[in-house]
Amino acid sequence: MKYAWKEIMFGKKKYILIELLLILLMFMVLFLSGLASGLGRAVSSSIDTMDADAFVVDDSAEQIITVSSVESRVLNELLEKNADAQPLDIQRMYIVKDRDDEKLNITYFAITPGSFIEPETTEGTGLAESDAEDPIILDDDFMLEGISLGDKVYDSSTDLEFTVTGFADDRMYGHTSVGYISTDSYTKLRKSLNPMYEPVYHAIAVRGDAEYDFKGNNLELVPKQEIIENIPSYSAEHITITMIVWLLVIISAVIIGIFNYILTLQKKKELGVMKAIGMRNSELVGMLISEVLIVSVIAAVFSLVLTFGMAAALPEKMPFYLEVPGAVTVTVAFVLISVLGSLLSVIHILRIDPNIAIGGGEE
Amino acid sequence: MSETLLELVDITKSYRDGESNRTILNGVNLKIEKGEFVAIVGPSGSGKSTFLSIAGLLLTPDSGRILLDGNDVTKISGSRRTMIRRKSLGFIFQSHNLLPYLKTEDQLAIVQEKEASERIHIDDLLNELDIADCRGKFPSQMSGGEKQRAAIARAFINDPDIILADEPTASLDAERGRISVEMIRNEVKKRNKAAVMVTHDTRILDLTDRIYRIENGQLVCG
């Protein structure tokens, strides 16, 4: 490690250029993975942050809450069995600020006010504490549309008036911001669209265990993570971007590998001499690996700083979301794959014939 | 214990040269005792380098035996060869072949074995070779003669039994070349080593104890 560092310090200019390239590559990887999870969260964060472990949906819904339908008696039966259960309806609609304003996408989450699936507000109060007839908690992205606490917003198709009682951060579903309303408001909304509407739930959110004959009632209990993966478009987007990220990690590693190989080729005579004077293969390979580690760890640190710095400066609406564990995973993978990428050079080192040191290398 | 440090018995080596086989060494015998400095001369292509490679455990002979301090090392494994080259052999090459990115003290420290560091001190060695002021210099900051002397220091750093020098004056002018070989001679005598030098520089042969000539694959005295 000591001698590898001396070699790097001796060839500073060369290594600074390599570092620069690696930092940019790594930055691109981290940035894309931030966008990947940001986009993922734009689809799923409302479910992800919900304090529920699983959801009851009907077994023909293919684990998609919005197309499921669960009779209200199921909720009562679950509650009788002491299950921690709450009804949930998810409905994509539009709201307007003023009656002739532009329509804004919204996904209503209809819940029981004060229940465990209600989000904590970052501003304002919860649904239960509000005096308004039809209160609503909005995702804080709506603030950027000029909506503030106490404002009235209207459902665009029914004209139902909601009073904004609170804001919660990071509540998205299928690329739209979520508004939390009470199940009563939701029933009112559905009845004004269709007077024959009979209250049924899309799903029932469950916390902890639930003893119930789901199968016999044509229902199933689906863990939260599966529900997220089955949100339309989530998997398709997620898999694509994740693939791009890992492809980039691998490409970066290949580039490091090639760089390393060129450097090793240039040092062929030097390495032959070192072998001739009795340097063990393990020592030479150790130096190479230390060099790769030093170079890639420096690149990793700088690109992490760069990425998180950039993230802080990004506009609010940009779907960028990079958690430290995720960034660390990508970074560690990058360092490991760089080491793997230098295996080609290792093989080259092992194959160098020390005899090239004798006779000036001509023979 | 015998005073013979290096013994080569009936060494043969041939190369494929296109269609035919060319025999470079054909039954070479050599015995070198402690404190002896031996020169091997011959025209280029005569097999001097091949001989040195075999003596230096860098090349295996087709037949014959190599004895180091009485032990047969002809057929030992690659990693043991490396270990013997590190601990018992000291190499001096045509050019200094120092690592460009290390200061002289690190050039020596990187190859020095722990047990040798108790017997040989880098400072003493650099003083004897008159390059103490090069201790903290990179090769690019040193003259040709100083670099070759640093390389000589590297050959002695592990207190080896045998020194193998491959045309050590090739990259130096006459005066510097002579000084370098004198230094090799002094170290060999002082530390009681055996040394083999391959050269075609006849001006330095008077510094050696015995001279061999390679002719038709045979080693001829004188």
Image: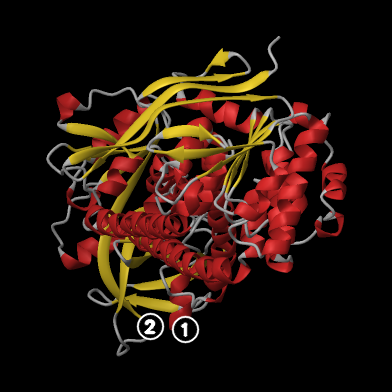
- Horizontal placement of A267 versus A60: left or right? right
Residue A49 seen: no
Q: Chain of mark 2?
A: A
- Horizontal placement of B36 versus A135: left or right? right
x then y, percent, for residue A165: 51, 67
Amino acid under label 1? Gly
Q: Please tell me which residue lies in front, B6 or B213.
A: B213
Q: Is residue A355 above or below residue B105?
A: above
Q: Residues within 10 Å of mark 2 (few under 14, many from 20)?
A: some
Q: Which label belongs to residue B54? A: none
Q: Cα distance, mark 1 to mark 2?
A: 9 Å
**Which quarter of the picture shows residue A172?**
bottom left
Q: Please tell me which residue lies in front, A332 or B115.
A: B115
Q: Residue at x 76, y 48 (%)?
A: B182
Residue A46 seen: yes
x then y, percent, for residue A363: 39, 50
- Mark 1 and mark 2 lie on one chain; the one further toward the N terminus is 2
x then y, percent, for residue B29: 49, 24
Q: Is residue A332 above or below residue A23?
A: above
Q: Please tell me which residue lies in front, A306 or A85.
A: A306
Q: Chain of mark 1?
A: A
Q: Which label belongs to residue A97? A: 2
> Is there CB contact under 8 Å for labels 1 and 2?
yes
Amino acid under label 2? Lys
Q: Are marks 1 and 2 on the same chain?
A: yes
State which quarter of the image contains the N terminus of chain A: top right
Mark 1 lies on residue: A146
